[in-house]
């Protein structure tokens, strides 16, 4: 049998080019190599959006539109919604008994996100405990591989700690440890050059953006502030246009030639922005067209099928978990 791989996204908006190069392209490849589950993590998204559930609800469907439009195949990938698999919540409760508050507070990924979100001393308990829920996500499907960036490795380590503790306490081997599958793609910077591309920061090009919106975003991109005239030598490092050309232009030799000309002087910012716009239009047009061919009924059917498949897998694991703990009272 193929190894099982689990990946997913928080439903907090449409997906953008950073997601495309960072994870979506990889998923299209991985679905031909592994038994792939893609989870829409709505429960996790509610840990810091609990007061705006409509945002989460609307974004669930947006994610599936984006998944299918880039080539994720529901016949090869099980796409499901986290909240619709009650076994995840049940396993989370059992796992909470196996981890201390101090250990959760020491998780580097959680500490960084607490600072980023400015919780201070008002940290929602659900947010602090989401690594436990994430451990249940991974474990209930017996996932052996989890695609992550380096900043998420502590989450995998914590999940494996919980699995080892569970298997030791209950003298079982019913739960598997998982390994991180590290992304080789660096995070895509935002169009403003100040941070990573982000839905919340408004500095991203979305997969569903219309041609005029893409063009507007490209032509407002940060370049070299000292490259005032086309004849001036320009800097490529930190120049967002060249960062995007590196990521998306299909001809790497042409990009290197453009860099040489820009460094020498004689190549204007408008020229390289036009080239980038053409590249992104060619990339995103078929994705947007595919998206427009999809309809809500089809998306709902994809989700119904995926949820049914995910429930079967989760139920099998939970039968083993309950037996190991000794709470399989009635058979």
Image (spheres, rainbow, N blue to C red):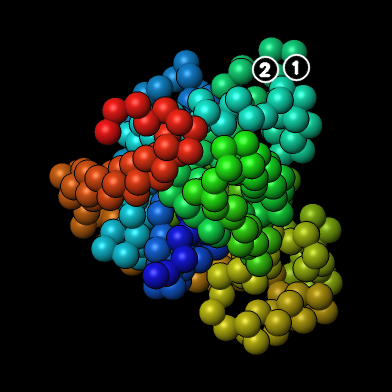
| Residue at x 50% of width, y 66% of height | 26
Q: Circle 1: is it few (<14), some (14-19), or many (20+) Cα within 10 Å?
A: few
- Quadrant into which the N terminus falls: bottom left
Q: Nearer the viewer, residue 27 or 285?
A: 27
| Residue at x 49% of width, y 32% of height | 325
Residue 205 position, x and y percent, is 51, 51
The residue indicated by pointer 2 is 123
| Residue at x 62% of width, y 58% of height | 179
Q: Nearer the viewer, residue 316 or 302?
A: 316
**Structural distance between the alpha carbons of marks 1 and 2:** 7 Å
Q: Nearer the viewer, residue 125 or 266?
A: 125
Residue 210 position, x and y percent, is 38, 53
Q: Is residue 302 visible?
A: yes
88 displayed left or right of 48: left
Residue 77 position (above or below residue 15): below
Residue 206 position (above or below residue 245): above
Q: Is residue 270 visible?
A: no
Q: Nearer the viewer, mark 1 or mark 2?
A: 2
Quarter of the image where one finds residue 311: top left
For the residue labelled by badge 2, is the local secondary structure a helix, a strand or a loop? loop
Mark number for residue 53?
Answer: none
Mark 1 and mark 2 in contact? Answer it, CB < 8 Å: yes
Q: Nearer the viewer, residue 12 or 35?
A: 35
48 displayed left or right of 168: left
| Residue at x 38% of width, y 34% of height | 87
Quarter of the image where one finds residue 247: bottom right
Residue 260 position, x and y percent, is 77, 81
Q: Residue furthest left?
A: 297
The residue indicated by pointer 1 is 120
Residue 151 position, x and y percent, is 71, 48
């Amino acid at each position: 049998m193929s190894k099982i791989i689990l990946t997913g996204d928080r439903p907090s908006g449409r997906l953008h080019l950073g997601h495309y190069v960072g994870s979506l392209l990889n998923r299209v490849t991985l679905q031909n190599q592994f038994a792939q589950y893609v989870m829409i993590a709505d429960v996790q998204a509610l840990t810091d959006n609990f007061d705006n559930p409509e945002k989460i609800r609307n974004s669930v469907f947006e994610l599936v539109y984006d998944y299918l439009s880039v080539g994720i195949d529901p016949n090869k990938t099980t796409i499901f919604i986290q909240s619709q698999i009650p076994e995840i919540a049940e396993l989370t409760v059992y796992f909470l008994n196996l981890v201390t508050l101090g250990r959760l507070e020491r998780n580097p990924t959680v500490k960084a996100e607490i600072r980023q979100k400015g919780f201070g001393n008002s940290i929602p308990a659900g947010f602090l405990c989401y690594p436990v829920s994430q451990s249940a996500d991974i474990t209930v499907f017996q996932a052996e591989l989890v695609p992550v960036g380096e900043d998420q490795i502590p989450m995998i380590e914590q999940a494996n700690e919980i699995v080892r503790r569970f298997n030791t306490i209950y003298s079982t081997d019913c739960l598997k440890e998982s390994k991180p599958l590290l992304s080789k793609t660096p995070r895509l910077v935002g169009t403003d050059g100040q941070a990573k591309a982000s839905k919340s920061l408004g500095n991203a090009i979305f997969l569903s953006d219309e041609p005029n919106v893409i063009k507007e975003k490209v032509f407002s991109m940060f370049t070299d502030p000292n490259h005032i005239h086309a004849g001036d030598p320009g800097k490529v490092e930190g120049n967002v246009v060249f960062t995007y050309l590196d990521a998306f232009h299909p001809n790497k030799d042409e990009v290197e030639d453009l860099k040489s000309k820009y460094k020498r002087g004689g190549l204007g910012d408008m020229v390289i922005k036009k080239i980038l716009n053409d590249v992104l239009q060619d990339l995103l047009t078929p994705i947007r067209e595919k998206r427009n061919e999809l309809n809500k009924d089809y998306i709902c059917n994809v989700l119904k099928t995926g949820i049914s498949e995910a429930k079967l897998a989760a139920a099998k694991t939970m039968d083993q978990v309950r037996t190991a703990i000794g709470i399989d009272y009635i058979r």
